[in-house]
Image (cartoon, coloured by chain):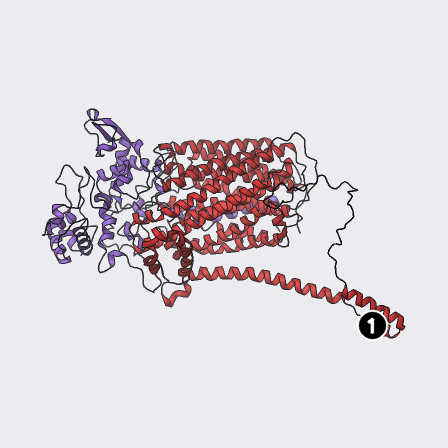
Chain colours: A red, B purple
């Protein structure tokens, strides 16, 4: 299989064969990635190296699982040996025959012992002497799905903190619905370009509205809101200044409102992705970040425990880094000519890596162990991931401009450190998966943990796929195609958004005392998950087909026409995702409706730091 | 010894300092170095209209779908004759005013074609105006938005001298006697788009090489233009179909049909090849045909001419590369040397 034969065989027929071929395309793509250019240098080709690296990763995971298994078997057999102490011969010799037959009899009975299976049951009537049961029914609320466990824990939260968390999350939810409505509309424009002819709704103006809204409106506000709870909780103290928390809330929301209006009116900063808001608008956002940082820092400073919990490392650092990033991204003195392009690569990648990813990791380090009610697997791994995140992530921005007129050495550095990103990614995902280990059964019983599991798996898959995408070889096929869009949704949606939801479902019921309908949480989860899958797979397949057609020299317009089917699937996936957001918004509403009675407080231990 | 676990100040400070140092090294310092370029000697300065057009380009977010960079890989040969160099952006990537930064022209997505050389490929303003008014009128499969708000529909009586009238078919207009004229912003945008051409490198400077695209058989995948027998129908849809349409029927009032054309069906291919090489502007009822002498090789012209002469119901005898070569010497002697 080579790209040529795939194109030769499939491409002219894709109009007819597209649907059954989507899977085949992906498969054959991965196969041709393993093959390569010249036979003498094939071992060193990036595609092969990437595939081998992935194999190493898989082997690493397999070895982890195997060593854990072996460890358990060894421990268990040791335990058995310790228990099986035979009666010494001298003792038996001294026994009277009756005694001896008694011993024999007991041993025989013991060997034949079996559990009857109804030890805990009975046929007699049951009494609830201690009033443990509050309600009993023979008709479950959900006839379709398993009943999940309601979290009985209620956290005693200061009303001001509860209010600020809920308002940040509430605003974030509104922006999620608005931002993805815009995204959904844009996705439909690929299939029906003549949907409208209104300047404010044209594709070029609306696209940044979608990205900026979900970045600065949804994810940022959700992260900060969830962060307020973590900072206060893990520092065992109250927030330094609620007033500043509110000020930041207003600044950030204002910046998204004004910024979007500007974009739709055709006022933008120059089209660099994620810095489309002109600087006065972004300044509002930056001020919001500065206020948030000062507030978080002051709260950590007055913590009542000596250690700074690792979550706070990530959260504080992500705020500091993002403030620096915004400054570098907007200062003018080095941004003429290709200077702007270097900063653009740096800015757009760090925006994702230093802000969303770093902050979100901090949130996982608190909410995941707290949802599982056990400590994080390895604190040290969290610290290692922290420093490598800073060292490697900062250097990889130029991988968005491979083969461009930017200096070759910068491209190489970016590619090399993109590979280095495997270290923090593996450290992080191993840490989270090992924390979940032993609690797999809890996942089936909880409506929070599936969101965590999907988020963590996407953290591994999306990030390592991103590293491979940075290679020169893969840039030939994928760069400039729809594959990029699939990658960014795999990460910003699969990782960040799923983790946000996990944290929101984990914490909001505990501070308000109101549970969402499990049926609707399930609907939210599955619609979002299946929608994302349809979205990414269709664009990856479509992007790969397009890239290979470009290499072949197929006329450009033909590749546009041939992608239409994939775009249709993307719009379908997007629709599912959007519907799930409406359900989520409703769930959030039911969880956060103003509760008149303060819930009875019980204390949940903060994660223990080993 | 710093204890990051207990000392919040040093934790935050170290994170800050290391990040600033790394960012300076990987972004700010190289950016500062890269922004100083000289323009290429033969690069024309941007006119005021072109600058205003660039502002419209930025304002409408064209870079969301269009790149402006020819990468140094084989597949990008479609978009320019040489890989882009930093000097190419000398005039266009400048901070325009205090509110906006240098436009992010290189782009990250090719939902639409690269525009580095669009002025070379489509030098006619009329084509651009029609295309921006309704892309699907000239390119059937296009998914580009229509930019109706940059046009005005007026009564013919109100068309002033100097107004640029767009040749929209009458059935698309609000009634008899209506005309569509381009707004000043649209004229600026078109002026900018037509100005997008790769400037030649100074004599003696070798352009960067295009790296071959990897194929599985050990050989680089070759683009059509390097093959012995180029694919005439591919060249037609790449170069010609934008105006003459995929079905060869052209667009009434804008671009003439090739199907059934007397010039195409002439037994002697000379008039047709002359027009392909040198362009044509003899008929007031149609737009200007740009010459393709610089764009296409003799082999490519032979292939596409033969394709047109045997398609769309045309039945003219095939021509040969030698014939094209001979005509090139008279029509465009300056390009004949390179062949």
B91 vs A53, left or right, is left
In the image, residue A572 lies at what x, y percent? 43, 43
Using the rendered image of the protein, determine whether residue B6 is visible from the camera's viewpoint.
no
A98 vs A586, left or right, is right
A144 vs A323, left or right, is right
In the image, residue A426 lies at what x, y percent? 54, 55
In the image, residue A312 lies at what x, y percent? 59, 44
The image shows a total of numbered marks equal to: 1
In the image, residue A602 lies at what x, y percent? 70, 39
Using the rendered image of the protein, determine whether residue B229 is visible from the camera's viewpoint.
yes
In the rendered image, the residue lying farthest to the top is B157
Image-quadrant location for residue B154:
top left
What subunit carries mark 1? A
Rendered residue at 61%/30% (across/down): A594
Question: In this orientation, which residue lies closer to the viewer: B58 or A439?
Answer: A439
Q: Is residue A333 above or below residue B331?
A: above
| Residue corresponding to mark 1 | A88
Image-quadrant location for residue B106:
top left
Q: Residues within 10 Å of mark 1 (few under 14, many from 20)?
A: few
Rendered residue at 51%/37% (across/down): A582
């Amino acid at each position: 299989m080579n790209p040529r034969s795939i194109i030769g065989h499939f491409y002219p027929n894709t109009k007819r064969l597209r649907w059954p071929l989507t899977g085949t395309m992906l498969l054959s793509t991965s196969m041709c990635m393993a093959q390569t250019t010249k036979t003498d240098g094939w071992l060193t080709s990036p595609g092969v190296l990437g595939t081998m690296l992935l194999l190493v990763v898989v082997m690493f995971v397999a070895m982890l699982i195997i060593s854990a298994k072996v460890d358990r078997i060894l421990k268990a057999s040791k335990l058995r040996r310790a228990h099986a102490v035979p009666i010494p011969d001298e003792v038996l010799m001294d026994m009277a025959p009756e005694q001896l037959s008694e011993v024999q009899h007991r041993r025989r009975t013991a060997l034949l012992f079996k559990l009857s299976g109804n030890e805990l049951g009975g046929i007699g009537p049951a009494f609830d002497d201690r009033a443990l049961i509050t309600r009993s029914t023979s008709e479950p609320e959900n006839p379709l799905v398993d009943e999940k466990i309601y979290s009985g824990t209620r956290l005693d939260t200061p009303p001001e903190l509860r209010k600020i968390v809920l308002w940040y999350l509430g605003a974030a939810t509104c922006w999620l619905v608005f931002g993805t409505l815009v995204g959904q509309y844009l996705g439909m424009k690929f299939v029906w370009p003549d949907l409208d002819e209104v300047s404010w709704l044209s594709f070029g103006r609306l696209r940044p509205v979608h990205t900026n809204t979900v970045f600065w409106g949804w994810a940022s506000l959700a992260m900060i809101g969830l962060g307020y709870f973590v900072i206060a909780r893990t520092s065992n103290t109250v927030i330094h200044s609620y007033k500043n928390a509110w000020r930041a809330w207003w600044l950030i929301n204002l910046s998204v409102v004004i910024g979007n209006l500007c974009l739709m009116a055709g006022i933008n900063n120059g089209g660099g992705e994620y810095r489309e808001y002109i600087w006065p608008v972004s300044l509002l956002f930056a001020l919001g970040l500065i206020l948030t940082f000062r507030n978080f820092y002051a709260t950590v400073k007055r913590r009542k425990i000596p250690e700074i919990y690792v979550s706070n490392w990530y959260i504080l650092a992500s705020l500091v880094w993002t403030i620096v990033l915004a400054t570098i991204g907007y200062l003018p003195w080095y941004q003429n000519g290709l200077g702007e392009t270097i900063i653009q690569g740096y800015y757009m990648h760090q925006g994702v890596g230093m802000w969303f990813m770093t902050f979100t990791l901090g949130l996982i380090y608190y909410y995941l162990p707290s949802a599982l009610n056990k400590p994080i697997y390895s604190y040290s791994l969290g610290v290692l991931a922290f420093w490598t995140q800073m060292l490697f992530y900062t250097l990889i921005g130029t991988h968005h401009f491979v083969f461009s007129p930017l200096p070759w050495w910068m491209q190489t550095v970016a590619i090399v450190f993109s590979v280095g990103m495997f270290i923090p990614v593996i450290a992080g995902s191993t840490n989270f998966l090992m924390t979940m280990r032993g609690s797999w059964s809890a996942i089936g019983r909880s409506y929070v943990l599936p969101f965590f599991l999907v988020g963590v798996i996407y953290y591994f898959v999306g990030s390592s796929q991103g590293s491979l995408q940075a290679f020169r070889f893969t840039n030939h096929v994928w760069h400039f195609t729809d594959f990029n869009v699939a990658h960014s949704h795999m990460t910003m949606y699969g990782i960040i958004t799923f983790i946000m939801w996990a944290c929101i479902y984990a914490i909001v019921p505990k501070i308000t005392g109101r549970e969402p309908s499990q049926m609707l949480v399930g609907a939210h989860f599955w619609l979002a998950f299946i929608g994302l899958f349809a979205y990414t797979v269709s664009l990856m397949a479509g992007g790969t087909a397009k890239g290979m057609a470009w290499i072949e020299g197929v006329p450009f317009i033909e590749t546009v026409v041939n992608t239409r089917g994939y775009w249709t699937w993307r719009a379908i996936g997007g629709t599912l995702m959007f519907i799930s957001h409406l359900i989520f918004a409703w769930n959030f509403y039911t969880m956060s409706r103003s509760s008149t009675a303060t819930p009875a407080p019980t204390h949940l231990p903060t994660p223990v730091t080993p | 010894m710093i204890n990051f676990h207990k000392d919040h100040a040093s934790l935050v400070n170290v994170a800050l300092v290391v990040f600033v140092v790394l960012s300076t090294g990987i972004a700010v310092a190289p950016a500062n170095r890269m922004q100083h370029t000289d323009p290429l000697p033969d690069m024309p300065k941007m006119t005021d209209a072109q600058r205003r057009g660039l502002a419209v380009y930025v304002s409408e977010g064209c870079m969301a779908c269009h790149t402006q960079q020819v990468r140094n890989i084989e597949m990008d040969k479609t978009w320019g004759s040489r890989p882009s160099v930093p000097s190419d952006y000398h005039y266009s990537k400048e901070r325009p005013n205090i509110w906006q930064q240098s436009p992010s022209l290189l782009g990250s997505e090719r939902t639409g074609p690269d525009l580095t050389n669009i002025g070379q490929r489509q030098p006619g303003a009329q084509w651009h105006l029609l295309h921006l008014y309704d892309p699907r009128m000239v390119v059937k499969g296009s998914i580009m938005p229509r930019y109706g708000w940059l046009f005005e529909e007026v009564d013919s009586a109100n068309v002033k001298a100097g107004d640029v009238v767009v040749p929209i078919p009458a059935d698309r207009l609000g009634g008899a006697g209506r005309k569509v004229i381009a707004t000043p912003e649209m004229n600026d945008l078109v002026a900018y788009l037509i100005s997008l051409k790769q400037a030649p490198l100074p004599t003696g400077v070798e352009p960067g090489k295009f790296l071959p695209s990897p194929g599985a058989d050990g050989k680089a995948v070759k683009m059509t233009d390097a093959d012995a027998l180029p694919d005439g129908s591919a060249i037609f849809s790449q170069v010609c179909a934008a105006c003459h349409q995929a079905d060869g029927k052209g667009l009434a009032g804008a671009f003439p049909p090739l199907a059934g054309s007397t010039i195409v069906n002439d037994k002697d291919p000379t008039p047709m090849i002359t027009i392909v090489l040198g362009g044509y502007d003899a008929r007031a009822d149609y737009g200007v045909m740009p010459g393709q002498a610089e764009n296409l090789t003799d082999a490519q012209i032979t292939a596409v001419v033969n394709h047109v002469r045997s398609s769309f119901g045309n039945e003219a005898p095939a021509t040969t590369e030698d014939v094209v070569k001979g005509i090139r010497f008279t029509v465009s002697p300056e390009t004949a040397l390179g062949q």
